[in-house]
Amino acid sequence: MEKKVGRPRSEETKKAILTASYELLLENGFNTITVEGIAERAGVSKATIYKWWPNKAAVVLDGFFAATESMLHVPDTGSVSEDLFIQVNNLAAFITSPKGKVITELIAAGQFDANIAEEYRVRYFNPRRLISQHILERGMQRGELKNDLDMELSIDLIFAPLFYRLLITGKTVDSAFVKSLISHTLTGMKAQTE
């Protein structure tokens, strides 16, 4: 008996779903989005969405990531300090913008739903951390940073103050803050020169 092969995934359909989820996210916020609403906006069935994504958080985060990925590009300037400033400043500018405020909404929702927390870690924050790791590794290769950095802790030290201000103190997160943050953080990471 010949095995039936299902229809291949349609990139147009997938794009319509991601676009619909992102538009609904911006219009109404994460908590009010439903898979039914995404399906209706995209002109597909709920079953089509569930073929590709396990839950609402996954499709919404993929839609968000697809729409915002180009906003977070980090060049290789040849300076670990400059690269980190660009990365963190771009992120700070984005998360304090109307579109980026979605991040704080997702973080809040993730405090009550482990699936949402896992989805935003895997789909959004882990890729950002990987970019930081590459920046730090390049700094180590160029002799700008110590060779024995604790990579995870170093990345935490870079981003924790940003999210502390954003989520706890409400103090300004601007380019001046980011410049000071990077300068202070890198002080303990710099390679010793003789």
Image (cartoon, grey):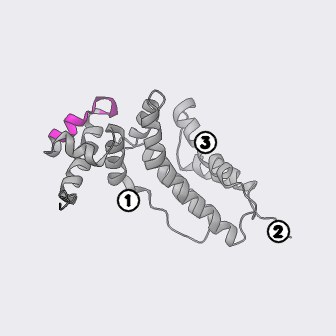
**First in residue order: circle 1 vs circle 2:** 1
Q: Position of residue 136 (x, y in %)?
A: 63, 62
Occupied quadrant, residue 24:
top left
Badge 3 marks a residue whose secondary structure is: helix
Which numbered tag is attached to residue 70? Answer: 1
Range drawn in magenta: 29-40
Left or right, 169 with respect to 105, comes to right
Query: Which residue of the protein is positioned furthest toward the top in this rendering?
Result: 112
In the image, what residue type sits under mark 3?
Answer: Ala
Q: Which circle, 1 or 2, is nearer the viewer?
A: 1
Crowd class of label 3 (few under 14; some 14 to 19; many from 20; radius 10 Å): few
Which secondary structure class fits the magenta region best?
Answer: helix
Spatial CA distance of label 2 from label 3 is 28 Å
Residue 64 lies in the magenta-colored region: no
Crowd class of label 2 (few under 14; some 14 to 19; many from 20; radius 10 Å): few
Q: Position of residue 33 (x, y in %)?
A: 27, 33
Left or right, 73 with respect to 22, comes to right
Spatial CA distance of label 1 from label 2 is 37 Å
Spatial CA distance of label 3 from label 1 is 23 Å
In-front residue for pair 2/174? 2
Q: Are marks 2 and 3 in contact (CB under 8 Å)?
A: no
In the image, what residue type sits under mark 1?
Answer: Ser
Badge 2 marks a residue whose secondary structure is: loop
Query: Which residue of the protein is positioned furthest toward the right in this rendering?
Result: 194
Which numbered tag is attached to residue 193? Answer: 2
Badge 1 marks a residue whose secondary structure is: helix
Residue 36 lies in the magenta-colored region: yes
Left or right, 127 with respect to 35, comes to right
Residue at 29%, 39% (x, y): give it: 26
Q: Is residue 159 visible?
A: yes
